[in-house]
Amino acid sequence: MNPDDHVCLCFRVSQRKLVNFMEREKPRVASQLSECLGAGTGCQWCVPFLKKLHAQWERGDVPQLTVAPAEYAARRSQYRSTGVRPDPDNPESEPQSPQ
Ligand code: FES
């Protein structure tokens, strides 16, 4: 994902907006990312990914998702139509992008 790709597709919240929010507001828990334009409060597909970004930020790493945006959107569509995460045992897993 590039910084301007949307992590929360429901509310069009980009990775850049989320990173800037964390730098500015220093959220103590991942759920506080919902204060960034409502991220995670729609279909909830992005919640595990918001948690992952927050965990990376807490560790001092550069928060970044490696999933390709098209793959991410496709997995969300599957989740929304079935109600099941493609990888329920590891919901925050990021599928590998084709190289
Ligand atoms: S994609 Fe974030 S709440 Fe739906």
Image: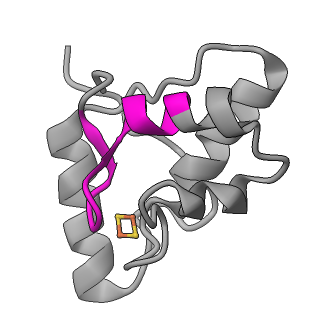
Residue 67 forms part of the magenta stretch: no
- Position in image of residue 58 (x %, y %): 80, 29
Quarter of the image with the C terminus in it? top left
- Position in image of residue 38 (x %, y %): 45, 67
Compared with 40, 48 (above or below) is above
Quarter of the image with the N terminus in it? top left
The quadrant in which residue 54 appears is top right
Asked whether residue 91 appears in the rendered view, the answer is: no
Q: How is the image coloured?
A: one colour
Compared with 26, 43 (above or below) is below
Residue 11 forms part of the magenta stretch: yes
Compared with 37, 7 (above or below) is above
In the image as oriented, which residue stretches furthest toward the front? 24
59 and 24: which one is in front?
24
Left or right of 20: which side holds 83?
left
- Position in image of residue 43 (x %, y %): 38, 79
Magenta-drawn segment:
5-20
Q: Quadrant of ligand 1?
A: bottom left
Asked whether residue 31 appears in the rendered view, the answer is: yes
Number of callouts in the render? 0
The quadrant in which residue 15 appears is top left
User: Residue visible at 53% across and 48% down?
Assistant: 49
63 and 71: which one is in front?
63
User: Residue visible at 45% across and 61% down?
Assistant: 39
User: Residue visible at 56% across and 38% down?
Assistant: 21
User: Residue visible at 27% across and 48% down?
Assistant: 72
96 and 53: which one is in front?
53
